C-alpha cells in the first residue's frame, strides 16, 4: 500500500524508558516536498520520535512507514533515500573534512564531484583539509548537515541542527535549507527549540511536551488562530496574586509565577483603551506594557505554563 | 579498476581507519617504541651477568691462637683491605665465563652477625670450632647454598685459584637458547593480543559512545564491512609492529628465525583472528569506556600473567598447566617460540591454528549477534 503523497507516515507510536513516557501516541504524515518542525522543550521526546522515524529506535507500539514501507527488511533500500543528522554526533577525530565526506560518499557510491559540491554548499572550503577534531561546533554541525545532504535525500531528518550556533551560523543553515526547499523535492523533518526557526522554515509545526503532541497545524494557521494574532503583555509595580477580570470584555491571563499578564487583542485601537480604563478602575500600577504579534512561545505558554526554551 | 576501488566502501573504510591509526602519535609509541624498549630492558637485564657479590660474616674466636686458626690465616694472608667499613676484607675470584665473584668478609661476634642476618645483609655466617669450619645458613635459600658451595671451595684450597678459563663450563650463548630468544616471541604474541583488544575494542566502544556507530549504520554501509575494515587495519598494524620488533631483536641480539616462515605466518594470522574475534565480542554491547576498559583488562591481564610471556609457565602448579596451555595467548606464544628456535612441531601448530581460528570465528559470530549498533 504505497501512499503516493505521504513520504513519512507515523501511526500511533509509543515509546517508554522505564518510567519515562518519551513518546506517548504520536501521529504524523509528511507530504512530498513539505518541511515540518517538531518543536518542544528539553526532554519533550523529539529525539526519540525522530530516531524512531529513522529506524534507529524501535517503538513499543505503533508503526512507521517510509515511502510506504516499514523499516524491517527494507533497511538497505530506505537508507538510500534518507539523509540525517543526529543530535551531537562526532566523526572520526583524525580524519580530514573531505576524507570524512569521501567515506560517507562511498557508502552511497557517490563520486568526488558531489563532495566538492557539498563542501562549497556548506561553505567549508577553508576547512576542507582540517581534521574534524579541530572544527568548531558550528563547522561540525555544517559538516554533519553536509553529510546528510550527500545523497540528495528524498527525506531529510535533522535533529536540532542549529542548537548552540551563533545567529549568523543559524541564518546560514537556514538559507541552505530554504534553497533546498526551493530547488528540490526533499521533505524535511526538523526538531528545534526555536520557534523562529520553525516559523521561518517549516510549513507545518508539531508542538511536543512530555511525550505528548499538544498542538499541531500549518504554521500560518497556528499563528493566526484563536483571537487574532496580536497580544499585549504587561507587568505591574507590585506583587499581584490574581486579577478579577470578569467585567473586562477581553480575555486576560495572569501568570502568577512570572508576574506577567497577557491580553489577546483583536483591534488594538479599541482594546487598548478598554484595557487602560480597566487598569485605572482597579487601581493597578503598570510597570511595562507591550503590544506584539503572537508567537509560538505564547501558544506554548498557554498550553503548558512554561516557555519553550526553559 | 582503480576507480571502482576508490569509491568502494570497504576500501574507504580501511583507508579511514588506517589514517586514524597512523595519525595518532600514541600508536607509534605503544605499538612500536614500547615493545622495543621492553625487549631492550629485559634483554639486557637478563643476559649480561654482572659481578656477583657475596657477603660473609666470620665469628671471631679469641681463644684460638692466631697461628692455629685456619680462618685467621686465611683472612690475613689471602684477603685484601676494602673501603667498606662493614665488610673490610675481600677476595676476588675471577672467572671468565661465570663473571667475577667478590667475597666480602666481616669478622665480628654472634650478636652483630644475627643483626646482619635479620637485615638480609648477609645470608651466611662461618665459625671455626675444633679445627673445623662450620657454615651457618638457611638450607632453603638457594643464594645461601650457592654461597656455601663457592665459599667452601676457596676455603678448602690453601691458595685461591684464579680460574682463568674453565673449560668444563660451556656457556649456552648459542642463539635460540638465551632469555632474549624466549622473550621476543612472547612479546610478539603479547603485542598482537594487546593491539587487537585495545585497537579494535576501544575504537568500537568509543564510536558507539560518540554516536558515530549509529550515524554510520543509518547509511547503506554494510555492518560487516565496518568490522572487517577494523580487523584488517589491526592485522596490518600488527604485522608491521611484529616485523619491526623482530628486526630490532635481530640487529641487536641476533635473534633469528630458524623454523618455517609459512608456519610463522599461519600462527600470526590465526592468532590475529582469535584476538580480533575476542575483541569484537568484548566490545559488542557496552557504550561506557570505563566498563570497556575493565572488560579488556579482565581478558588481557590474566593471559599476560599466565601465558608465559616473560617467564615460563612451567613454574605454575602442575594442575594448572594444561589449562594455561589452552589459552590463546599461550598457544600463539609457544608456537612462535617453537618456530623461532626450530623445535617446530607441525601437527601441534596446525592443531593450534585450527583452535585459534575457531575461537576467533565463534567469538566474532557471538559478538555480531549481540552487537549494539545504536
Ligand atoms: N535511552 C534512554 N534511556 C532512558 N531514558 C531516555 C532515553 N532516551 C531518552 N530518554 C528520556 O526520554 C525523554 C525524551 O527524551 P528525548 O531525547 O527524546 O528528548 P528531546 O526532546 O530530544 O530533548 P532535547 O531537546 O533535550 O534534545 C527524556 O525524559 C529522556 O530522559
Ligand atoms: Mg533531542
Image: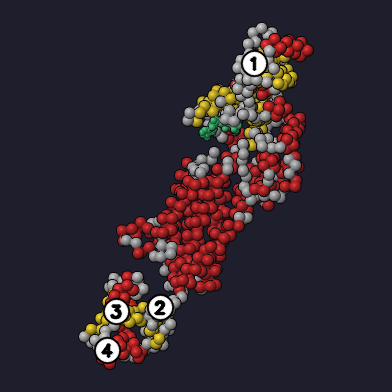
Q: Secondary structure at mark 3?
A: loop
Where residue B146 appears, x then y in whole percent? Answer: 33, 77
Q: Secondary structure at mark 4?
A: loop
Mark 1 within 8 Å of ligand 1, using the beta carbon: no
Q: Nearer the viewer, mark 1 or mark 3?
A: 3
Are the two marked residues, 1 and 2, in contact with CB atoms closer than 8 angstroms?
Answer: no
Question: Looking at the image, can residue A77 be seen?
Answer: yes
Q: Residues within 10 Å of mark 4 (few under 14, many from 20)?
A: some
Find the distance from the CA under tag 1 to the CA under tag 3. Answer: 104 Å
Residue under the point 45% across and 74% down: B47
Give the residue pinned by disc 1: A253
Q: Nearer the viewer, mark 1 or mark 2?
A: 1
Q: Nearer the viewer, mark 2 or mark 3?
A: 3
Mark 3 within 8 Å of ligand 1, using the beta carbon: no
Find the distance from the CA under tag 4 to the CA under tag 1. Answer: 117 Å
Which circle's residue, 2 or 4, is located before the other in the chain? 2
Give the residue pinned by disc 2: B52
Give the residue pinned by disc 3: B109
Residue under the point 70% across and 42% down: A139
Q: Secondary structure at mark 1?
A: strand
Question: Does B150 sit above or below residue A182?
Answer: below
Give the residue pinned by disc 4: B69
Q: Chain of mark 2?
A: B
Find the distance from the CA under tag 4 to the CA under tag 3. Answer: 16 Å
Find the distance from the CA under tag 1 to the CA under tag 2. Answer: 96 Å
Amino acid at each position: 500500500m504505497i501512499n503516493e503523497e505521504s513520504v513519512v507516515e507515523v501511526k500511533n507510536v509509543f515509546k517508554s524508558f522505564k518510567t519515562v513516557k518519551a513518546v506517548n501516541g504520536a501521529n504524523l504524515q509528511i507530504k512530498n516536498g513539505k518541511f515540518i518542525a517538531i518543536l518542544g522543550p528539553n526532554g519533550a521526546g523529539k529525539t526519540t520520535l525522530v530516531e524512531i522515524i529513522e529506524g534507529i529506535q524501535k517503538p513499543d507500539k505503533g508503526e512507521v512507514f517510509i515511502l510506504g514501507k516499514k523499516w524491517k527488511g527494507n533497511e538497505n533500500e530506505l537508507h538510500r533515500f534518507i539523509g540525517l543528522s543526529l543530535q551531537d554526533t562526532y566523526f572520526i577525530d583524525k580524519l580530514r573534512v573531505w576524507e570524512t565526506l569521501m567515506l560517507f560518499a562511498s557508502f552511497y557510491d557517490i563520486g568526488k564531484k558531489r563532495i566538492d559540491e557539498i563542501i562549497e554548499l556548506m561553505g567549508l572550503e577553508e576547512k576542507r583539509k582540517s581534521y574534524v577534531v579541530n572544527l568548531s561546533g558550528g563547522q561540525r554541525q555544517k559538516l554533519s548537515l553536509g553529510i546528510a545532504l550527500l545523497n540528495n535525500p528524498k527525506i531529510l531528518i535533522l535533529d536540532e541542527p542549529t542548537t548552540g550556533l551563533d545567529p549568523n551560523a543559524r541564518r546560514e543553515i537556514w538559507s541552505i535549507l530554504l534553497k533546498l526547499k526551493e530547488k528540490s523535492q526533499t521533505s524535511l523533518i526538523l526538531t528545534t527549540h526555536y520557534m523562529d526557526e520553525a516559523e521561518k522554515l517549516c510549513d507545518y509545526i508539531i508542538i511536543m511536551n512530555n511525550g505528548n503532541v499538544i498542538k499541531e497545524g500549518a504554521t500560518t494557521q497556528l499563528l493566526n488562530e484563536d483571537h487574532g494574532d496580536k497580544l499585549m503583555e504587561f507587568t505591574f509595580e507590585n506583587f499581584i496574586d490574581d486579577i478579577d477580570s470578569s467585567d473586562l470584555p477581553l480575555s486576560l491571563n495572569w501568570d502568577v509565577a512570572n508576574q506577567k499578564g497577557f491580553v489577546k487583542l483583536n483591534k488594538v485601537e479599541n482594546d487598548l483603551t478598554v484595557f487602560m480604563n480597566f487598569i485605572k478602575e482597579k487601581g493597578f500600577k503598570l510597570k511595562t506594557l507591550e503590544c506584539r504579534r503572537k508567537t509560538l512561545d505564547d501558544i506554548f505558554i498557554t498550553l503548558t505554563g512554561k516557555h519553550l526554551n526553559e | 579498476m582503480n576507480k571502482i576501488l576508490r569509491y568502494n566502501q570497504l576500501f574507504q573504510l580501511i583507508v579511514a581507519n588506517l589514517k586514524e591509526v597512523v595519525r595518532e602519535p600514541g600508536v607509534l609509541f605503544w605499538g612500536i617504541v614500547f615493545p622495543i624498549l621492553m625487549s631492550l630492558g629485559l634483554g639486557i637485564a637478563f643476559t649480561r651477568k654482572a659481578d656477583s657479590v657475596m657477603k660473609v660474616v666470620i665469628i671471631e674466636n679469641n681463644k684460638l691462637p692466631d697461628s692455629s686458626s685456619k680462618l685467621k690465616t686465611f683472612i690475613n694472608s689471602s684477603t685484601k683491605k676494602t673501603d667498606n667499613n662493614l665488610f673490610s676484607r675481600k677476595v676476588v675470584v675471577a672467572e671468565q665465563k661465570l663473571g667475577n665473584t667478590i667475597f666480602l668478609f666481616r669478622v665480628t661476634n654472634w650478636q652483630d652477625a644475627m643483626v646482619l642476618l635479620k637485615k638480609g645483609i648477609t645470608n651466611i655466617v662461618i665459625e671455626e670450632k675444633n679445627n673445623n669450619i662450620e657454615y651457618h645458613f638457611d638450607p632453603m635459600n638457594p643464594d645461601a647454598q650457592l654461597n656455601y658451595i663457592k665459599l667452601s671451595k676457596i676455603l678448602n684450597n690453601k691458595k685461591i685459584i684464579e680460574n682463568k678459563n674453565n673449560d668444563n663450563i660451556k656457556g649456552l650463548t648459542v642463539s635460540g637458547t638465551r632469555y632474549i630468544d624466549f622473550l621476543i616471541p612472547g612479546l610478539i604474541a603479547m603485542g598482537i593480543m594487546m593491539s587487537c583488544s585495545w585497537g579494535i575494542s576501544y575504537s568500537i566502544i568509543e564510536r558507539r559512545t560518540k554516536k558515530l556507530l549509529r550515524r554510520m549504520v543509518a547509511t547503506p554501509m554494510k555492518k560487516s564491512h565496518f568490522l572487517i575494515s577494523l580487523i584488517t587495519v589491526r592485522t596490518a598494524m600488527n604485522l608491521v609492529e611484529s616485523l619491526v620488533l623482530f628486526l630490532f631483536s635481530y640487529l641487536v641480539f641476533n635473534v633469528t628465525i630458524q623454523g618455517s616462515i609459512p608456519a610463522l605466518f599461519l600462527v600470526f594470522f590465526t592468532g590475529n583472528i582469535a584476538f580480533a574475534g575476542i575483541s569484537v565480542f568484548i566490545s559488542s554491547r557496552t557504550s561506557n569506556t570505563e566498563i570497556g576498559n575493565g572488560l579488556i583488562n579482565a581478558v588481557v591481564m590474566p593471559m599476560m600473567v599466565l601465558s608465559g610471556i616473560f617467564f615460563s609457565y612451567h613454574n605454575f602448579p602442575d594442575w594448572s598447566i594444561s589449562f594455561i596451555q589452552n589459552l590463546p595467548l599461550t598457544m600463539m606464544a609457544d608456537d612462535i617460540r617453537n618456530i623461532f628456535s626450530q623445535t617446530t612441531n607441525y601437527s601441534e601448530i596446525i592443531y593450534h591454528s585450527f583452535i585459534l581460528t575457531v575461537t576467533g570465528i565463534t567469538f566474532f559470530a557471538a559478538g555480531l549477534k549481540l552487537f549494539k549498533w545504536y
